[in-house]
Image (cartoon, grey):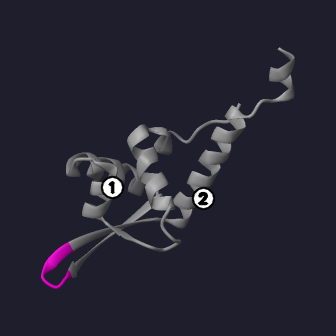
Amino acid sequence: MTELDPVIHAQARLRVVASLSALGDGDKIAFPRLQELLAMTAGNLSVHLRKLEDAGYVEISKTHRGRTPATLVRLSRRGRLAFEEYTEAIRALLEPTSSKEQS
């Protein structure tokens, strides 16, 4: 049986990774916009982003837009690959196999 990545499998982190995977490769999203899209509190989103960052799945950069600090988030190449493997594992679990059909 295929194992699901426990870092991605948590519901909130799955929503984060799925949202970030919709961006183009290398594209970034501002933290407040991601928070708005996911309807998550800043604290909750921060905790999940930290876990994803520790796994190497997201990259977070801090910059300034004028005098205003800005936090930008993007899915890393490793994160994109991990999400692709995760979705393949989900599909494998959901697809009927010949052994299931014989039961």
* Residue at x 27% of width, y 47% of height: 40
Which of 96/3 is in front?
96
Task: Please tell me whether the stretch drawn in magenta is mainly helix, strand or loop.
Answer: strand
Query: What number is the disc on residue 68?
Result: none
Q: Is residue 103 above or below residue 90?
A: above
Q: How far apart are marks 1 and 2 (CA)?
A: 23 Å
Q: In which quarter of the image is residue 98?
A: top right
89 is within the stretch colored magenta: no
* Residue at x 29% of width, y 63% of height: 33
Q: Quadrant where the N terminus lies?
A: top right
Query: What number is the disc on residue 37?
Result: 1
Q: Is residue 103 above or below residue 79?
A: above
SS class of the residue under badge 1? helix
Callout 2 amino acid: Leu
Q: Mark 2 points at which residue?
A: 81
Which of 98/6 is in front?
98
67 is within the stretch colored magenta: yes
Boundaries of the magenta span: 65-69
* Residue at x 68% of width, y 33% of height: 94
Q: Residues within 10 Å of mark 2 (few under 14, many from 20)?
A: some
Q: In which quarter of the image is residue 81?
A: bottom right
Residue 22, position in %: x, y? 50, 62
Residue 42, position in %: x, y? 21, 52
